[in-house]
Image (cartoon, grey):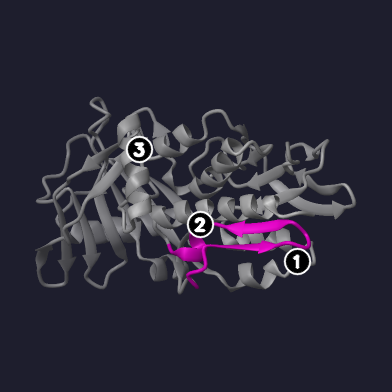
Amino acid sequence: MSHTPSTAVIGGGLAGVICARRLHEAGHAVQVFEKSRGIGGRMNARRDPDGAWWHGAQYFTAHTQEFEAQIQAWLADGVVQGWQPHLVTLTRYASHPAPAGRRFVGVPANSAPVRHTAQGLAVHLSHTVSHLQRDDQGWWLTTREGGRLPQPFQRVVLATPAPQAAALLATTSSPLLPRARAVNMRPCWALMLHYAEAPALPFDGAFVQDGGPLAWVAARHGSHQPNAAPGWLLHARADWSQLHLEDPPEKVARRLIDAFGDLGAPPPERWQAHRWRYAMVNHPDGVPCAWDPAQQLGLCGDGLLGSRVEDAWASGRAMAHHLLKAAERPA
């Protein structure tokens, strides 16, 4: 049996989990380190007594046969279903039907496909990797929560947002650093609005193109939350979010609630805000992953291909394929 090097995957979003799953199925020793309390990245949910909020990725679509096949597998496993809301596009002067297309969501939450894919993997939650150091034994990882890990890894894959990957790469001499720094990721303010009664709006969700701060509004997903209280999620435009990135949440909420009111919505009973610092990517270069063979370092994630769920999946899949091919080559 050929030697299979141990791999640390930093980042428990879809790209990292897909990469780890494929390595694991090929017999490689792989461990995933995620800084949050749950996996899924922007597909994760925020939970409160009134139900769950899908405050990041709301749904996903397939643009390639490969991802369509993956969705069909998830459908067969019961972790995905089709989503057919009444969606519109709102401009300054009119409302139009949103572009047609097949949309999918996770069951019972959008993180379900990621959690399903991660079954059986060694996943370490609340592990924020803060430093990488390489010696003749391999890569040593240091976390903020527990310090230096007790064993080295032969390979490391960075599956975090590119700016976070760049911060880790800055302590190395890897040529991947300029690549990570070149990825321009933009933020998104998300606002979760709680209502006693559901607002009487003529749509379930809307792409907003009226020149204001909003980019997307949608009713809280409720098909698997029969007891969830009424709610609406608001996403701000990336450029507006960038301009107001460091504003207090109260100021952001006032602006977004006022803009939602211009669409006919009443004020909420209460709200929660979340700032996605790395949500969208400008001008991806189209190369799904990067590999530094000299230092055994890899880079993947949706920021390299685009901002879709499919982009994250394709990037993690490409990274795993590259590592498996590299492991087959003679030393």
Q: How many marks?
A: 3
**Can you give x and y, in whole percent of width and height, for residue 94 in the image?**
9, 69
Please give the label number shown on residue 4: none
Q: Magenta stretch?
A: 285-306
Judge depth for marks 2 and 3 and give the one in front.
Answer: 3
Q: Is residue 212 above or below residue 165?
A: below
* The magenta stretch spans residue 295: yes
Which image quarter holds the C terminus? bottom right
Q: Earlier in the sequence, mark 2 or mark 3?
A: 3
Question: Given the image, on which type of amino acid does mark 2 rest?
Answer: Ser
Please give the label number shown on residue 174: 1
Question: Given the image, on which type of amino acid does mark 1 rest?
Answer: Ser
User: What crowding class fits label 3: few (fewer than 14 Cα within 10 Å), some (14-19), or many (20 or more)?
Assistant: few
* The magenta stretch spans residue 27: no
Judge depth for marks 3 and 1 and give the one in front.
Answer: 3
**Closer-to-camera residue (267/113):** 113
Q: Which residue is mark 3?
A: 73
Assign a secondary structure to mark 2: helix
Q: Earlier in the sequence, mark 3 or mark 1?
A: 3
Question: Given the image, on which type of amino acid does mark 3 rest?
Answer: Ala
User: What crowding class fits label 1: few (fewer than 14 Cα within 10 Å), some (14-19), or many (20 or more)?
Assistant: some
Q: Is residue 84 above or below residue 330?
A: above
In this picture, residue 90 sits left or right of residue 129: left
Assign a secondary structure to mark 1: loop
Q: Earlier in the sequence, mark 2 or mark 1?
A: 1
In this picture, residue 19 sits left or right of residue 263: right
Tag 3–tag 1 contact (CB < 8 Å): no
**Closer-to-camera residue (257/30):** 30
The answer to whether residue 271 is seen in the rendering is: no
Please give the label number shown on residue 315: 2
